[in-house]
Image (tube, rainbow, N blue to C red):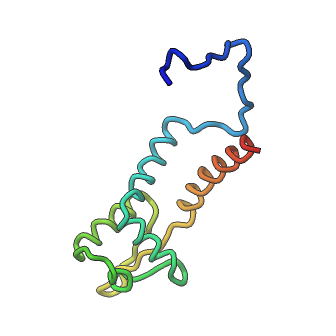
Amino acid sequence: MSKSKLPITPVQVCSAAPIVREPLTETTAAELASVFKALSDPVRLRLLSAIAAREGRQACVCDIADGFEVTQPTISHHLKVLREAGLLDSERRASWVYYRVVPEALQRLSDVLLVESGAAEQVNA
């Protein structure tokens, strides 16, 4: 259908839906976008999932490197990106580095996504 044949609703008939939460600020959106960008790589998403799946949501890099068809330096790079995004913390223990999920970071993402999902469910109801 061409654009010229689309029905047009007069402005007087439109009514704005009520705001159910504050929209993201520009700063918050930029911060969250960098976190989502870190998660947009399948290897990084799998690494985060592998760590989160472990008891205590922490794991040694030696325990999570198996099953990835990338080199150890590449895994280290991906873990660094996740750390810089605030999704992981790390701690050196002897010659190994242990990574731990930052629960507050995941909760922040969850809050944004669930509120959005909940608002969509209200609209569709």
- State the quadrant of the C terminus: top right
52 up-or-down from 103: above or below: below
Is 105 left or right of 91, judged from the image as shown?
right
Please report the residue visible at 51 percent of the width from the left and 66 percent of the height from the top.
102
Percent across and percent down for residue 45 are: 42, 65
Percent across and percent down for residue 86 are: 45, 60
Please report the residue visible at 73 percent of the width from the left and 38 percent of the height from the top.
20
65 up-or-down from 21: above or below: below
Percent across and percent down for residue 97 are: 35, 79
Percent across and percent down for residue 48 are: 44, 70
Residue 91 vs residue 58, the one in the foreground: 58
Picture quarter containing residue 50? bottom left
Residue 100 vs residue 70, the one in the foreground: 70
Q: How many marks?
A: 0
Please report the residue visible at 24 percent of the width from the left and 69 percent of the height from the top.
74
Residue 30 vs residue 20, the one in the foreground: 20
Considering every residue shown, the one lying at the far right of the view is 125
Is 27 left or right of 104, judged from the image as shown?
left
96 up-or-down from 112: above or below: below
Picture quarter containing residue 95? bottom left
Considering every residue shown, the one lying at the far front of the view is 1
Please report the residue visible at 60 percent of the width from the left and 52 percent of the height from the top.
113
